Amino acid sequence: MFFDNWSQILKILLTGTLAYIAIIVILRVSGKRTLAQMNAFDFIITVALGSTLATAMLSKDTPLAEGLTGLALLVLLQFLVSWTYVRLPFFARLIKSEPRLLFYQGEFKDKVLKEERIEREELLQAARNQGVLSLDEIAAIVLETNGKFSIIKNSSHPDHSTLTNVKKD
């Protein structure tokens, strides 16, 4: 139960070390996008990479070459999707959600909060985390595509708004 044999322990140590080195090389070659803040698609790739790495390390039936091929395939697919995403706007809309306006000019957008399953208290907490004492200091709160809240403080330059690509309804 606690120990089968030394050869399996040695396999895990060797495979784990080689797979670890290989994943670092693969991720470095694939570029910064692979390691960027995660949206839903990036999260899925990260979980799949972890699962593939674990299988390569622990499965008696999966040779190292097959595990590394799986890792390389996932990173290649992520690269191809992000390459296509940048070049084809309709594809980008399929893969990534739009930022949503949750609070604007003193008003909570209750319909959007309900659709996104967010409580007002979460927005208040996000504001406090940014050192905001009063909602009067805030022009807008946006739910970003990676699930984080952006707090936009009131500005004296409204013509240069960062809200141009935010879904307002």
Image: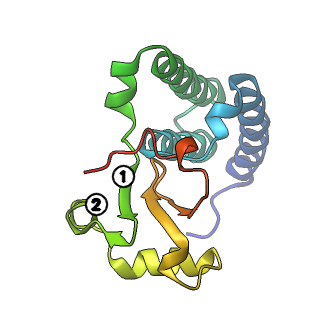
Depth check, front residue: 96 or 112: 112
Q: Residue at x 49, y 41 (%)?
A: 48
Q: Residue at x 52, y 27 (%)?
A: 78
**Quadrant housing residue 142:** bottom left
- Amino acid on which disc 2 is placed: Glu
Q: Do labels 2 and 1 touch, CB within 8 Å?
A: yes
Query: Is residue 111 placed above or below 79 in the rendered structure?
Result: below
Res. 59 in view: no
Using residue 102 as the reference point, say whether residue 147 is left or right of it. right
| Position of residue 2 measured from the top left corner of the image (x, y, whole percent) | 61, 70
User: Going 38% across and 63% down the picture, which residue do you hit?
Assistant: 104
Q: What amino acid is at disc 1?
A: Arg
Q: Which mark is residue 100?
A: 1
Image x and y of residue 58, in percent: 59, 47
Q: Quadrant of the N terminus?
A: bottom right
The mark found on residue 116 in the picture is 2
Q: How far from the left and from the top, in percent, is residue 55?
A: 54, 43
Q: Nearer the viewer, mark 2 or mark 1?
A: 1
Residue 139 lies, with reference to residue 126, above or below; the image says: above
- On the image, the x and y values in percent for residue 95 come to 37, 32
Image point (62%, 34%), residue name: 34
Q: Is residue 155 above or below residue 98?
A: below
Q: Which mark is residue 23?
A: none
